[in-house]
Amino acid sequence: MDTGKVVLGALAGLATGAILGILFAPEKGTDTRKKIVTKGKDTAEELKTKYNDLIDKLNSKLETVKSEGLNYYEEGKDLAQNTKKSFENTANSVK
């Protein structure tokens, strides 16, 4: 899922909740606004945490794939060199 869509959806949900909270709140407006601000900050922090966790996981997977790719490259390089030597030895023995 696209991160931009997740953030946009979260912000839209937050705005909708804030509007409905103000309209249907049984408390004074100032108290309601304070709760909305607090909830907004909590939600923003939660989104930041999830975003950072996602970035950390992606970086970890990228490093794993990079390491495995380098290993495969080295194995392929060694295999090619060994095959070349084998062909050279075979060609020299046929002469």
Image: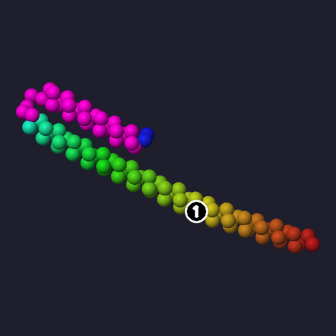
- What kind of residue is marked 1? Leu
Q: Nearer the viewer, residue 40 or 88?
A: 40
Assess disc 1: are there few (<14), some (14-19) or many (≥20) residues with their C-alpha within 10 Å of its C-alpha.
few
**Residue shown at the point (36%, 51%) measured from the top left:** 53
Q: Is residue 92 depicted above or below 28 in this figure?
A: below
Is residue 8 part of the magenta span, yes or no? yes
Q: Is residue 77 left or right of residue 84?
A: left
Q: Nearer the viewer, residue 58 or 30?
A: 30
Q: Residue furthest left?
A: 28
Q: Is residue 8 left or right of residue 78?
A: left
Instruction: Report helix, strand or loop for mark 1.
Output: helix
Which image quarter holds the N terminus? top left
Q: Quadrant of residue 40?
A: top left
Q: Quadrant of residue 18?
A: top left
**Residue shown at the point (44%, 52%) measured from the top left:** 58
Which image quarter holds the C terminus? bottom right
Q: Nearer the viewer, residue 74 or 18?
A: 18
| Count of all numbered marks drawn on residues in the image | 1
